[in-house]
Image (spheres, rainbow, N blue to C red):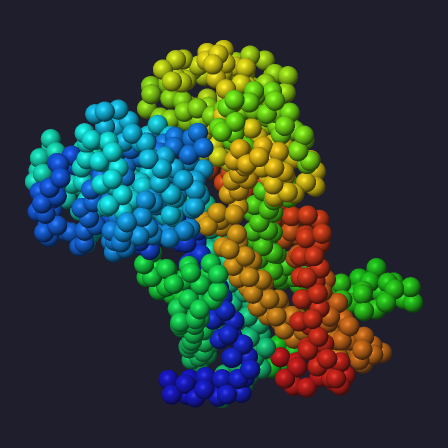
Amino acid sequence: MRATWRWVHSDLRTHRGEALFAVLATAGVIASLLLSAALLGYAVSPWQRVFNESRGAHIWLQDHGGPDPAALAPLTSLDEVAAVSGPFRTAAATLESGGARAGTVLRAAGPRPPGTARPLLTAGRWPGEDDDAIVLERSLATALWADPGETVTVTLPGRGGPAGRALRVAGIAETAEPRYRPGRGGGVGWVPAAALDRLLAAAPGTPTGHALGLRLKDPDDTDYVVQRAVTLLGAGRVDQVTKWQQAKADFGGDDRLLGRLFAAFGLAALLAAALAAAGAVRARVRGQAGDIAVLKAIGFTPGQVVRGYLLRHLGLAAAGAGLGTAATLACGPLIPGRVGAAVALWPRMPGHRAAVLGLPAAAVLLIGAATALAAWRAGRVPPVPAARSALPAARPLSAAARRALGPGLAPVLVLGRRFAFTAPGRARALGATLRLALPVALMTVALTGWSTLGQFHTDPARMGRAAALTVRAENLRQTSDAALERTLEAVPGVADAVPGAELAALVPGQNGTLTLRGLGTAADPYPHTVVEGRAPAGPDEAVAGQGFLDLLGARVGEWVRLTVEGRPQILHVVGRSVEPDHGGRVVSTTLDTLRDGAPELRPGFHALVLRPGADPGEVAAGVAAATRDGAEVRPSADPADGPDAPRGVLAALVAVLALIGLVDLLALVGTGTRDRLRDLLALRAVGLTPRQAGGVVVTAAALTALAAAALGTAAGAALGHLIVDAEAAATGIGAGVARLPGPAVLAALVAAATAAGALSALPPAVRTARRRPTASPGETL
């Protein structure tokens, strides 16, 4: 064992540069994978992120026990409870802004946000103690079209009839509680305690209650704590119990497939890293064949050779994994932007410890497995140099290759193609090409996802965003709909102003809610993005999103029955449209169809389709000027701009795969140069110039990289189209949105891979050109 250690130590001292490169390459792969894991948790688990940042409550209890909150005190002393939020005095209210209404629960707030279940302000500020102001939960603010600085009318149901009072929106916040859904409640508004007192004084008789949040030591105790709480308070006093599982399902149920997609990317990247490491180890064994033969000749057993390689490469892999992990955990939070925020939050996310320990351990184990196979081959190296030197290094030139070596074609191209694809063996050349094509294919898939998200900006109509702006004109009710449409269409840059209305509908069985949307008329239809079937043209015809079809188990061509405001609505689904809103649970028909059942229905908004090249900001300003600020203009929501968009994860994946591909490429170039050295020296002896010999090395590497890049981009484009469409269908948007990267991007990827192959071959090409056309004993092994 001592001799093995001395050999390993001597080898590391002799090849310090290679050892350092191996450590840094492994550290880079591990760091990139850990950053991708952190971004994955940040992107696909928005509820968990908000819950951890706000120290959210696992259970929320709402009671109607009157003004004394002392009855809730026994709950705070339960052994399973780690912290409490509240109790907060509450009152049911209706909020109105710009004609939009939403029922919510007002919650009395202190001068500072609570420490547990703290609302996370995303805009504005927390109100002062005596302010007539309100902080709205984000989904509630979206439903009301309310921004900080605007006013909302708060109405409480008192005995003397509803009494309204205007409150200024001080801020908008995120919480880990269920989001607001029209017709299903949810959404919270925080008002100062003094402001709530004034509201209650203006509406005497308004029922009040208390809300109490319980943060548990163990989330698995949720059901048990709920039972104890109801028993202590009495079932007659508890109005509502909300558990964290409900909020999580409501918050991010559509991100599950996205999480699986990125997990598959991570595993594929880890596999590609293991293949690259295996190639590097095999190259190392072939390069040291002469040293191994000498060791065996002086008495080393095959077992000692195997142990030496295992110790060396496992030690380098462990050092690289440790360095990458430490650097990520220490420096990751300092990275600006979303990456740093994700790494800083990551320790509080589930699965953090498993990822920090599991990813480096898995990488080391995979490298160890690859090293074991290569080390076993090293143990079989014969101790007699002549036994290896007597073997031919490559097949003889074919007749076509010999003819091509004439004056009509440069020898560099002919020999470079031969060394890339035939020497020393076609199977080895094909394996190297496929191994290098794997990261290129995965990069193409990631770029396909990036291009698809980019369509929200470059081609919104294809993503169900034909209308760039939405106008609500509740303050212009005295103006006729036709006059308002003419006013809007007269604004420079507006191609069409399509009237629309949006209603909540119940599915058959009335156990679910979806969105029924009326857009346009038979004479002026809305340009739906239809990917299956056709657009609605007749009465009772509609197009539906994928989420709607999945919820009802329906298909294009079927009739569906809904309940809208207590009346039945029967529609014929003639097409499937791309619907990025409401998880695709949207069915769209014409206003004419909706007016058949409700003749008094007026448009609730107008969707503005802009002319090509029109700037939405300038058009919005033009609408405000034309209506004299009587209309409210909002841009259409863009999922690609949300805080949970996965583009950061995609960028990290591309960086990981590029690093893996570079490591594998360097190993392939080094191996190929050593395998072809005898042939190159023989060609030098028969007349090949030093520059031509170096050019052969560069040409062979460039052609290998070119073949791998072309194969990888073709396979990645086909696979990426399938994966992105599957993800879109599972999230309710619907298949048919995948967009491949442009030809220029794919060509740039192929060109970059080819250039990387040529550049990586320059150092060995220079060394080969400087060799004398005679083989040393080491070169025969």
Q: Is residue 385 above or below residue 100?
A: below
Measured along the vertical axis of the image, is residue 144 above or below residue 359? above
- Horizontally, residue 743 falls left or right of residue 455, namely right
Q: Residue at x 76, y 76 (%)?
A: 694
Picture coordinates of residue 90, whole percent (x, y): 22, 39
Q: Nearer the viewer, residue 202 or 310?
A: 202
Q: Give the residue displayed 82% in from the left and 62% down from the top.
A: 401
Q: How many marks?
A: 0
What is the quadrant of residue 736 in the picture?
Answer: top right
Picture residue at 48% right of the left edge, 35% below the top: 581
Give percent across and percent down for residue 730.
Answer: 46, 36
426 sits left or right of 327 in the view: right
Q: Quadrant of the C terminus?
A: bottom right
* Residue drawn at the location 65% of the way across and 86% of the way down: 777
- Whether residue 219 is visible here, answered yes or no, is no
Q: Nearer the viewer, residue 627 or 11?
A: 627
- In the rendered image, residue 611, in percent from the top left (x then y), is placed at 69, 35
Taking 79 as reference, is 541 left or right? right
- Viewer-closest of 594 and 144: 144
Q: Is residue 361 visible?
A: yes
Question: Residue 717 placed where, x, y %?
Answer: 62, 46
Asked whether 520 or 35 is in front, the reply is 520
Q: Is residue 501 above or below residue 746?
A: above
Q: Is residue 525 above or below residue 666?
A: above
User: Which image quadrant: the N terminus?
Assistant: bottom left
